[in-house]
Amino acid sequence: MSPSITVLTGAGISTESGIPDFRGPNGVWTKDPAAQQMFTLQNYVADPELRRRSWQNRRAHAAWTAEPNAGHLALADLELAGRLRALITQNIDGLHQRAGSQEVIELHGTLYGVECLGCGDRTEMSDALARVEAGEQDPPCLLCGGILKSATISFGQNLDTAVLRRAQSAALDCVTFFAIGTSLTVQPAAGLARLAARNGARLVIVNAEPTPYDDLAERVIREPIGQVLPALLAG
């Protein structure tokens, strides 16, 4: 039997692991709207103080101590059972991989890497954070002196075209498309749900809050992800 399920996950799947989402009632941007400035490339490049604040936020990120929850583990089991066409995530926390998922399409990059905005050199986040802890508040690239940023996609920054093509292909080549823990408001990730539905896939949305794509879904579930996903995917 060919894998028939494509899954898109967002921040909501990781909240049960202690990583806050962005737009929910207790979201990072809900509590501190100014924090969104750190996620906008133009502001990050222009403002050294914003970069210094960003590095301190990276040091304190909940991903370093978070553990995968039942939702992450259920998706790893789905892959192990040979039923998963693709796992696409908007998350940067690496919890899917830590849960055992082998093939993860990271649309928005990863917190575990660092990229130079000048020369493109890629290094490990652990190395950059060690420099921050040693006193470099805004560590420059060791090769060219350029600005370093986490290897994640900020507002105003294009997605990797090859990664996006893989995600679009998976959305077009599935029988069922699950959108889990995502507000489906950030494009082009959100458009994957419409792409799948218009190509005949059954769309299932599991999210605490309404999304712009609920009217396209065959089923919308508002229950806690870690509670409902294991049984839902086992069916």
Image (cartoon, rainbow, N blue to C red):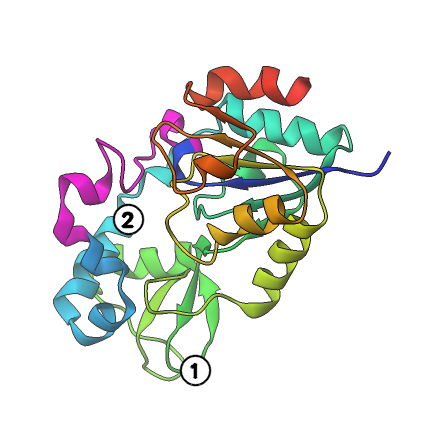
Give the magenta range.
Answer: 13-35
List x then y, in percent, for residue 101. 63, 38
List x then y, in percent, for residue 217. 53, 34
Separation of marks 2 and 1 at Cα, in angstroms:
24 Å
Does any portion of residue 137 appear in the rendered image?
Answer: no
Relative to 118, is 207 above or below? Answer: above
Q: Which image quadrant is residue 214 in?
A: top left
The reply, left or right, for residue 174 in relation to residue 130 is right
Q: Residue at 32% across / 56% down in the picture? A: 129
Which of 61/140 is in front?
61
Amino acid type at image mark 1: Cys
Q: Which residue is mark 2?
A: 59
Say few, some or many: other residues with alpha carbon within 10 Å of mark 1 (under 14 / 14 to 19 / 20 or more).
some
Relative to 19, is 38 above or below? Answer: below
Residue 87 lies in magenta, yes or no? no
Does any portion of residue 221 appear in the rendered image?
Answer: yes
Q: Which residue is mark 1?
A: 119
Amino acid type at image mark 2: Arg
Say few, some or many: other residues with alpha carbon within 10 Å of mark 2 (under 14 / 14 to 19 / 20 or more).
some
Q: Residue at 22% across / 32% down in the picture? A: 26
Tag 2's secondary structure? helix
Looking at the rendered image, the quarter that the C terminus falls into is top right
| In this view, the mark in front (2 or 1) | 1
